[in-house]
């Protein structure tokens, strides 16, 4: 049997991955009809909104959606119809870390993947290529295949592919338009290889062929976990060095630059910070830890676990630096936290370092004044309610205010903490911030974003991650 020519794609999950990924496929493949479905009506309504108030913020996304929506790109809650019409289905649902039960805190919660897979099996009346887009533990495709085969109708055949997504939030559209690589894993059977070719042909509409890597299913699944683990490991490594810099007077920027000149190491992902966040790094490493433990490889599990532990340590270490510098108490003191998103150019707050910092400041009885240019206020309250369990939101609101500008956030504050590397924080008129603050006025740069010398000339006391006091 020759590879099918994909004509209709369904993507289950209209989130940070499913939405942008399939919008870019629709943009580059005008002959393919792409329908992105989700159970969340509000999310689909936002994707369909007349004024393009999309449910996620991502530079360049609106432009892509404007070009393709209504032409060959559709958003719907009619999951069954889209499944039935498609010849290729992406499963791009969330795979959070389990919060309770066996393996809690380590294992990926595959409930959404399983439900989506069962849905495909129960409604499909013709053969499909089913593509794991979600990040999943190694050999999840096997479970999906078992579910599909046990529940399918006669004459329905399912081929399973793994096609993990490597986009980074904040640069998703560029990453999708010019990917470093597209990875497709398949069973090495004639049917598996045909399915792989069918998906590769879709990407070949805009991705150079040499960047489309085809591998075995398990290698593909593991590669995604490994890539995120290696990226996070670099951050934890540079953060571990930042602690040594602070204690010795070495400068982490100089050290990172010196290391990065080595062509075997390279300069990327060597920026020290208050710690990594986002929905993926921690979750995927914990996944790898869980996988290693279930394979009876405790030393391997401990090795990767350390990357997450170092990240926690970095966040807590930074919060402690703030408290220690403010004369060892922040009770009743106002602290401006600039940035709530886990990184710049996204409104996503999942696992944001800002949440840990604010939680610690609240516990130390500070008054926290938050500003973020993109995060919805409601999201901030939801995150804080989750991070500070047992405290009614009204009580949290007595200590935390959300502000409309950096100057408002800094009003009467003793300290400004940079939690997210939004470019606009570099461009603030820091003299105005200084004027509105109590004195002495402190800045804690958790993102190595600001020109410390310039701030010192204004009058600020500046503490920067990874720079000794000297
Ligand atoms: P998300 O939470 O933003 O989106 C997932 C969507 O799936 C939600 O809108 C949810 O309502 C929907 N959904 C869940 N079950 C469904 C079902 N049965 N039918 C229809 N819709 C359903 O998640 P995300 O950030 O897009 O991540 C999706 C996957 O991609 C995860 O496995 C994640 O690890 C992986 N990933 C994420 C990123 C990232 O930067 N966010 C990058 C690479 C990979």
Image (cartoon, rainbow, N blue to C red):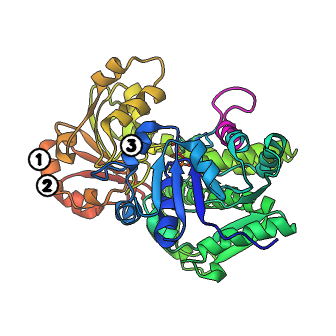
The answer to whether mark 1 and mark 2 are in CB contact below 8 A is: yes
Q: Is residue 241 above or below residue 205?
A: above
Give the quadrant of the C terminus.
Answer: bottom left
User: Can residue 114 be spotted in the picture?
Assistant: yes
Q: Which range is magenta?
A: 98-117
Quarter of the picture holding the N terminus? bottom right
Q: Which residue is mark 1?
A: 435
* Residue that numbered label 2 is attached to: 431
Q: CA distance from mark 1 to mark 2?
A: 6 Å
Q: Is residue 56 above or below residue 256?
A: above
- Left or right side of 335 for 23: right
Point out residue 298 in the picture as x, y percentages from the top left corner. Answer: 83, 45
Instruction: Please report the residue visible at 38 percent of the width from the left and 28 percent of the height from the top.
Output: 362
Crowding near the residue tagged with mark 3, few <14, some 14–19, many ≥20 C-alpha atoms within 10 Å: some
**Residue pictured at 37% horizontal, 66% vertical:** 67
The CA distance from mark 3 to mark 2 is 43 Å
Name the element at disc 1: helix
115 or 266, which lies in front?
115
Would residue 101 be counted in the magenta stretch? yes
Q: Main secondary structure of the magenta part?
A: loop
Whether tag 1 and tag 3 are in contact, CB under 8 A, the answer is no
Specify the label residue 45 is tagged with: 3
Query: Could you say which is closer to the camera, residue 236 or residue 442?
Result: 236
How many circles with numbers are drawn on the protein?
Answer: 3
Element type where label 3 sits in the image: helix
CB atoms of marks 3 and 2 within 8 Å? no
- Determine the residue positioned at 46% across, 63% down: 72
Relative to the observer, which residue lies in front, 143 or 165? Answer: 143
Residue 197 vs 389, above or below: the answer is below
Residue 412 location, quadrant: top left
């Amino acid at each position: 049997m020759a590879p099918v020519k994909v004509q209709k794609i369904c993507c289950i999950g209209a989130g940070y991955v499913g939405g942008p990924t399939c919008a870019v496929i629709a943009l580059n493949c005008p002959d393919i009809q792409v329908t992105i479905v989700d159970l969340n009506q509000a999310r689909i309504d936002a994707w369909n909104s007349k004024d393009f108030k999309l449910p996620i913020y991502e530079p360049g996304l609106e432009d892509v959606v404007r070009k393709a929506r209504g032409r060959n790109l559709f958003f719907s809650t009619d999951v069954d119809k889209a499944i039935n019409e498609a010849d290729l289905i992406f499963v791009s649902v969330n795979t959070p870390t389990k919060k309770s039960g066996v393996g809690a805190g380590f294992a990926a919660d595959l409930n959404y993947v399983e439900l989506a897979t069962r849905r495909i099996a129960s409604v499909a009346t013709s053969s499909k290529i089913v593509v794991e887009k979600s990040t999943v533990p190694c050999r999840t495709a096997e479970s999906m295949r078992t579910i599909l085969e046990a529940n399918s109708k006669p004459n329905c055949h399912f081929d399973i592919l793994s096609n993990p997504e490597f986009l980074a939030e904040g640069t998703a559209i560029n990453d999708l338009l010019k990917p470093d690589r597209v990875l497709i894993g398949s069973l090495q059977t004639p049917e598996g290889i045909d399915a792989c070719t069918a998906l590769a042909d879709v990407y070949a509409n805009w991705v150079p062929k040499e960047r489309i890597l085809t591998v075995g299913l398990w290698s593909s699944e593991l590669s995604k976990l490994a890539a995120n683990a290696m990226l996070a490991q670099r951050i934890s490594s540079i953060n571990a060095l930042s602690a040594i810099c602070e204690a010795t007077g070495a400068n982490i920027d100089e050290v990172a630059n010196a290391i990065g000149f080595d062509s075997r190491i390279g300069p990327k992902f060597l920026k020290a910070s208050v710690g990594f966040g986002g929905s993926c790094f921690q979750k995927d490493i914990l996944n790898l830890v869980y996988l290693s433990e279930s394979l009876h490889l405790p030393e391997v599990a401990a090795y990767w676990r350390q990357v997450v532990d170092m990240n926690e340590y970095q966040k807590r270490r930074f919060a402690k630096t703030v408290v220690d510098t403010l004369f060892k108490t922040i009770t009743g003191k106002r602290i401006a936290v600039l940035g709530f998103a886990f990184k710049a150019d996204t409104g996503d707050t999942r696992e944001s370092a800002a949440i840990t910092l604010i939680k610690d400041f609240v516990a130390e009885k500070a008054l926290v004044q938050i500003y973020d240019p993109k995060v919805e206020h409601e999201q901030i309250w939801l995150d804080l309610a989750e991070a500070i369990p047992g405290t009614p939101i009204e009580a949290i609101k007595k200590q935390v205010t959300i502000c409309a500008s950096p100057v408002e956030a800094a009003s009467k504050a003793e300290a400004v903490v940079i939690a997210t590397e939004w470019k606009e924080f570099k461009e603030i008129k820091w003299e105005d911030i200084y004027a509105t603050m109590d004195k002495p006025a402190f800045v804690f740069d958790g993102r190595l974003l600001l020109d410390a010398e310039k701030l010192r000339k204004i009058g600020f006391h500046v503490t920067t991650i990874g720079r000794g006091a000297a």
